[in-house]
């Protein structure tokens, strides 16, 4: 489904027919059978959904693109390497007309990683090298209008009131016409898993270190200050926070709005 929180309007996308020999990858090989991306084609101002399907026999990927204006799916010729493992991002990973995923060159190899980008306009994938000798990345995110890769480093050297923290190195991508380079933005030490990187530089944590309730915590990486938020996690492992930019785009079109007003 597509959902616009600003207009409180939602739209269920049409189903995609499955070939008769469809066999998804088992869960012990792939986190899920599908990977998704969502964003805007800046050339046409059309919203698109990208769906990457993992097929098991024979091993290959199928990429489908949904256009909001036509309300339909298309299969595109993506030519993705079947040996790649594509990791789902826990944070929004769309920026300026591109969607991003982390990929591993081999499904059982977590040491040689790449960044995969998808151009929403040209509908072409591109592989981008990650920083050398940093380790295995945990996730990607959009921080300060830049593509960022998050590398966890396990260290006992950083401590605070709640005990041992986990350190994360944040690297941002510097893209030019010729090539991409990476710059280390900062290192943060947090007591629990980040849920959201906010535009003001603060980070929301899942608050797993809370003694009583599993509260959400606001963390300031500049001062190390922790502040409990009046929002409580019920213990679900799938609890996430998502940032969005307000828009008055109508996912069902003007006809639907007029019908709702009439009824």
Image: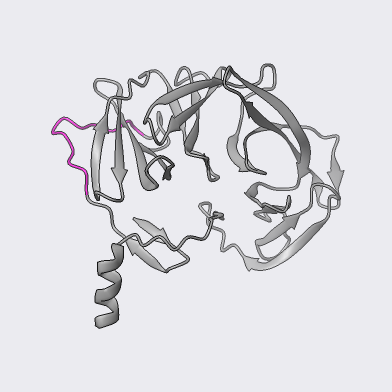
Q: Nearer the viewer, residue 46 or 199?
A: 46
| Residue found farthest to the front | 43
Give the image location of residue 129, x and y in percent: 57, 19
Give the image location of residue 231, x and y in percent: 63, 67
Residue 252 sits in quarter = bottom left
Q: Is residue 65 magenta?
A: no
Q: Nearer the viewer, residue 43 or 145?
A: 43
Is the stretch drawn in magenta largely helix, strand or loop?
loop
Which residue is at 49% across, 33% downward? Answer: 101
Q: So how many labels did they put on this image?
A: 0
Which residue is at 86% across, 50% downward? Answer: 223
Does residue 201 sit above or below 230 in this rendering?
above
Give the image location of residue 53, x and y in percent: 32, 33
Give the image location of residue 259, x and y in percent: 24, 75
Does residue 89 sit above or below 115 in this rendering?
below
- Which quadrant of the rendered structure holds the N terminus? bottom left
- Asked if residue 223 lies left or right of residue 112, the reply is right
Q: Nearer the viewer, residue 145 or 133?
A: 145
- Asked if residue 147 lies left or right of residue 38, the reply is right
Residue 58 sits in quarter = top left
Does residue 148 sit above or below 196 in this rendering?
above
| Residue found farthest to the bottom | 263
- Asked if residue 223 lies left or right of residue 120, the reply is right
Q: Is residue 21 magenta?
A: yes
What is the magenta range? Answer: 15-26
| Residue found farthest to the left | 20
Does residue 227 sit above or below 21 in this rendering?
below
Which residue is at 30% across, 22% downward? Answer: 60
Q: Nearer the viewer, residue 62 or 177?
A: 177
Q: Which scheme is used to colour this image of the protein?
A: one colour
């Amino acid at each position: 489904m597509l959902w616009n929180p600003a207009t409180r309007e939602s739209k269920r996308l049409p189903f995609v027919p499955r070939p008769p020999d469809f066999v998804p990858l088992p869960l012990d090989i792939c986190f899920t059978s599908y990977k998704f991306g969502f964003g805007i084609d800046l050339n046409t101002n059309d919203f698109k959904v990208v769906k990457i399907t993992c097929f098991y026999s024979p091993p290959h990927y199928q990429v489908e693109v949904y256009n909001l204006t036509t309300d339909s799916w298309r299969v595109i010729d993506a030519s993705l390497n079947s040996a790649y493992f594509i990791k789902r991002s826990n944070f929004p990973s769309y920026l300026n007309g591109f969607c991003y995923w982390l990929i591993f060159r081999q499904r059982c190899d977590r040491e040689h990683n790449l960044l995969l980008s998808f151009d929403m306009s040209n509908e072409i994938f591109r592989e981008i090298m990650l920083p050398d000798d940093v380790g295995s990345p945990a996730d990607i995110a959009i921080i300060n209008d830049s593509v960022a890769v998050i590398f966890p480093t396990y260290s006992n050297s950083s401590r605070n009131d709640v005990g041992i923290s986990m350190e994360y190195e944040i690297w941002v991508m510097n893209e030019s016409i010729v090539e991409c380079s990476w710059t280390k933005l900062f290192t943060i030490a947090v007591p629990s898993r980040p849920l959201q990187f906010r535009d003001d530089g603060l980070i929301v944590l899942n608050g797993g270190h809370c003694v009583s309730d599993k509260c959400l915590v606001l963390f300031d990486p500049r001062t190390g200050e922790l502040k409990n938020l009046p929002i409580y996690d019920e213990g679900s492992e799938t609890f996430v926070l998502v940032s969005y930019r307000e828009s008055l785009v109508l996912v069902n079109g003007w006809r639907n709005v007029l019908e709702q007003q009439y009824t």
